[in-house]
Image (cartoon, rainbow, N blue to C red):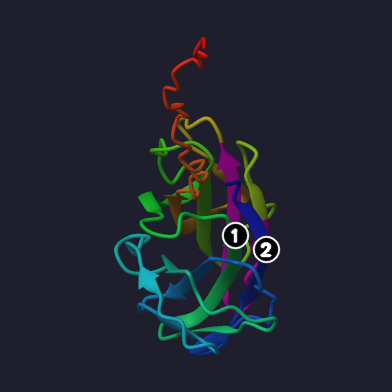
Amino acid sequence: MAIALVARTVKVGTGATVANDAINVTGANLLLALCCSYQNAQAVSDNKGNVYTGLTERLWLGSDRRIRLFYCLNPITDPSLVVTATGGGFPSIGVAAFSGVKVSGAFDQEAGGGITNVGFSPGLITPSADNALMIAGICTSGDPGNMQINSSYDLLWGPGASGMGVGLAYKTVSPASAQSPSFTWTNNAGIAALHTSFLAQPPASPPHSPRFSPRYSPRFSPRIA
């Protein structure tokens, strides 16, 4: 089954919490919340009571500019989903919903890190199966200018003003092959970034049809009177 984007949005916050503008996630079986903050870690919740699993937090210089991806598999969906991130300073959030993801054990691999520069690759991942979903995220302080990503990843960027800049990018890849995207921007800046893969639901096996074995029927031999 092919993975497809259902909805995606980013929201730059200015206080201790941030919530995305409501999006329609009907039909999705994977929800992602990409959280960026200054110094303190974050937690996420939504208006449907879904429970999210947090992956490894990635940091710039050990504390500032934190980024973490949370996911919820087989969620309760809604035409107006709102995800809230709490904790941290000046948090921002990216929310995405996908269909066609493996219904059990969808999370595959992750990588990430931080740097002060004008470009960064959050790490190489070779997904363990075809048709995988690749997610790349980046967190910056403010807007370093002209944020981009290569390798055909589709980026939605929310430049920070008084909050943290947040970028959420994705692609699907088949056959499975090594993926190592790079973010680039204009002005020297400290960032944290991550790279993650999720697996697609395998196609259903065709129903088993037993082979037809006709019973032996002796040939008719008429009696001669």
Estimate the x, y position of residue 6 in percent, counting from the top left: 67, 63
Residue 134 percent location from the top left of the image:
51, 47
Indicate the amino acid at tag 2: Val
Q: Secondary structure at mark 2?
A: strand
Residue range in magenta is 156-173
Which secondary structure is most common in the magenta stretch?
Answer: strand
Closer to us: 85 or 197: 197
The amino acid beneath tag 1 is Ser
Measured as percent of width and height from the top left, residue 119 is found at 53, 44
- Circles 1 and 2, Cβ within 8 Å, touching? The answer is yes
- Residue 194 within the segment the image draws in magenta: no
Can you say whether 218 is above or below 128 in the image?
above
Check disc 1: other Cα within 10 Å, few if <14, some if 14-19, many if 20+.
many
Total label count? Answer: 2
Give left or right: position of 48 versus 127: right
At label 2, counting other C-alpha atoms closer than 10 Å, the crowd grade (few under 14, some 14-19, many 20 or more) is some
Mark pair 1, 2: CA separation: 7 Å
* Residue 166 position by quadrant: bottom right
Please give left or right for residue 216 compared with residue 149 in the image.
left
Could you tell me which residue is drawn at 51 percent across and 79 percent down? 91
Q: Earlier in the sequence, mark 1 or mark 2?
A: 2
Residue at x 43%, y 51% (from the top left corner):
196
Image quadrant of residue 178? top left
State whether residue 200 is above or below residue 180.
Answer: below
- Camera-near label (1 vs 2) is 1
Towards the viewer: 8 or 116: 8
> Disc number at residue 6?
2
Please report the residue visible at 60 percent of the width from the left and 84 percent of the height from the top: 82
Above or below residue 12? Residue 194 is: above
Q: Which mark is residue 99?
A: 1
What secondary structure is marked by label 1? Answer: strand
